Amino acid sequence: MKPQFLIAAPHSGAGKTTVTLALLRALERSGRRVQPFKCGPDYLDPKHHTLAAGQESVNLDAFMMTAQHLPEVYQRYTQQADVSIIEGVMGLFDGARKMEGSSAALAALLDVPVILVVDAQAMAYSAAALLYGYKHFFPDITLAGVIFNFVNAPAHYRILEEAAADAGVPVLGYLPERADIRIPSRHLGLHISAETDYNAIIDAAAGHLSAHIDIERLLQQTLRPVATPVTGAAGSSGVLRIAIAKDEAFNFTYRENIAALSQLGVIHYFSPLTDTTLPPADLLYFPGGYPELHLPQLAANTGLLQQLRQYEGRILAECGGMMYLGENIVDETGHPWNMAGLLPVSTSMQQPALTIGYREVHIGDVIFKGHEFHYSHYVKAPDITDPAIRVWNARQEVIPGTVFHTPRLLAGYMHFYWGDNVAGLQRVLGLPG
């Protein structure tokens, strides 16, 4: 029996990320090994989790991951932890299609209780109806407690306590508002600024939460049996040399994707920002990130770009990595910066418009799932039509989507998930088994 739970909210902006980070740091300070998880495909929240807990956070996504693979991943990491905490996504019941892929669906799949963070600054006894609805709407989950956020007066909290009691939901405490523990706004919804002292913010949030929330009661309320992992993480059995771009420009990776790649061979990291030579590799992986924030430095590294043009191995590139492989990237002022020129496209940060959503791509009979999240767009659109490649959204609607595929390259705006499909990656890129 170990504490394990999902932190959710009725809507975004209620404070679940702050509460999650504060709990992770408070438990880490107490000497517990706490394992963070993130519901959904987001890259930034896991980076904050890892900083707060001292343990790398793991994404759990019921759209991108199979129903067998997801519990196996959760059980494997939970086995090693004293406490496991999942941060939810959006509102508790918000999914790609109704509840599909939602925090509630994940809690039901893993049989973990839910702690609800409620923004109560403009709410009093009406909280009873809200809590009653969240407790009974979906019987497959257990609402183990509520934390009321942005409550500044004890008298206000007493009303909220009465409301929760009448709804039959345990109250774990309340948090007065503090501006200094809010996580700053984020570029693309994903950017961690080097100018912000996140450690100091998380420390302050942990102290604030510890003063107002009964953490030990929360842990008792969320004790659940720990399942034994069905399978362990596979060790490396391959001989490939795999080089992964990793620096401030390219850093959006999923832990299980990297674990799957490690089965194929030995992984090394390099920086397109600072390394002047391309490492010896059979496979190059350029993940997403922020190339648009480092265009002068990327364009000035001409030696590496020229070696990339002459590279004869396999290449995998996603979103920002795909932009880097194009002919140029146009910055917000309209200035084009020359890139690798391996793909017949140019992309731009001018007139940004958000493209977001889950994707399912079929390349022949190989299926990958993933997601898109970007504000950039093509200014020189790709002139390719491959009937063997089809792209759907989460509602199974065919959508216009460009996936570049040759016998030695796979690239696109889509962030691919292959943590449970490394064999598909081998087939698509012709990698040895």
Image: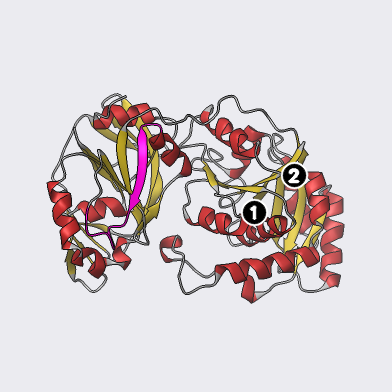
**Of marks 1 and 2, which one's residue comes earlier in the chain?**
1
Label 2 environment density (alpha carbons within 10 Å; few <14, some 14–19, many ≥20): many
Q: Main secondary structure of the magenta part?
A: loop
Q: Secondary structure at mark 1?
A: loop
Q: Position of residue 17 (x, y in %)?
A: 60, 59
Q: Indicate the quadrant where residue 247 lies.
A: bottom left
Label 1 environment density (alpha carbons within 10 Å; few <14, some 14–19, many ≥20): some
Nearer the camera: disc 1 or disc 2: 2
Are the residues flagged by discs 1 and 2 in contact, CB closer than 8 Å? no
Q: Position of residue 270 (x, y in %)?
A: 32, 53
Q: Secondary structure at mark 2?
A: strand
Asked if residue 228 is positioned above or below residue 191 in the image, the reply reads above
Q: Which residue is mark 1?
A: 10
Q: Position of residue 282 (x, y in %)?
A: 25, 38
Quadrant in which the N terminus is drawn: top right
Q: Position of residue 36 (x, y in %)?
A: 61, 48
Tell me where the magenta segment starts and ends, as one range.
Answer: 263-277
